[in-house]
Amino acid sequence: MLTIERLQEYGVNTKEGLARCMNMEKFYFKMLGMGLKNDSFDKLEKYLAEGNLEEAFEAAHALKGVVGNLAITPIFVPLSDITESLRAKKDLDYVALYKPIKELRDKLVSEL
């Protein structure tokens, strides 16, 4: 089961995330569930696999806001890097860059 302590072990800034949720832990976890289950994660993975970098940018940018507001730092930081690289249209292996994000997101979802 996902707890504040477990989130902290993953590197989530729970103090910041809770503050954005009026320090209401139950509400924070509800928002975490909604954020981590956001279908933009699946869209981003699909668009990256297809090489559709314009749509991938849109999905990444939307997710960056969601995970940023929830202070899911270990997803936010690499997702921000991907978003900015997509914005700049850099030629990178985005699928490989997205893999650790997906793995952590899947772990967190499985523990909700």
Image (cartoon, helix red, strand yellow):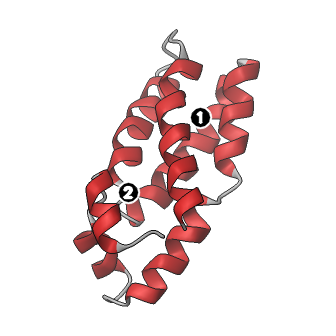
The location of residue 27, given as percent across then percent down, is: 47, 86
In contact (CB < 8 Å): disc 1 and disc 2: no
Disc 2 residue crowd, few under 14, some 14–19, many 20+, Cα 10 Å: many
Image position, residue 23 (x, y; %): 31, 88
Q: Is residue 46 left or right of residue 96?
A: right
Residue nearer the viewer, 65 or 1: 1
Mark 2: which amino acid? Ile
Q: Identify residue for label 1.
A: 57
Residue 41 as seen in the image, left or right of residue 63: right
| Quadrant in which the C terminus appears | bottom right
What is the three-letter code of the residue carrying label 1? Phe
Q: Within 10 Å of the Cα at label 1, are there few (<14), some (14-19), or many (20+) other Cα atoms?
A: many
In the displayed structure, does residue 51 sit left or right of residue 69? right
- Report the front residue among 29 and 38: 29
Which label belongs to residue 72? 2
Q: Is residue 15 visible?
A: yes
Residue 15, relative to residue 71: is it above or below?
below
Q: Nearer the viewer, mark 1 or mark 2?
A: 2
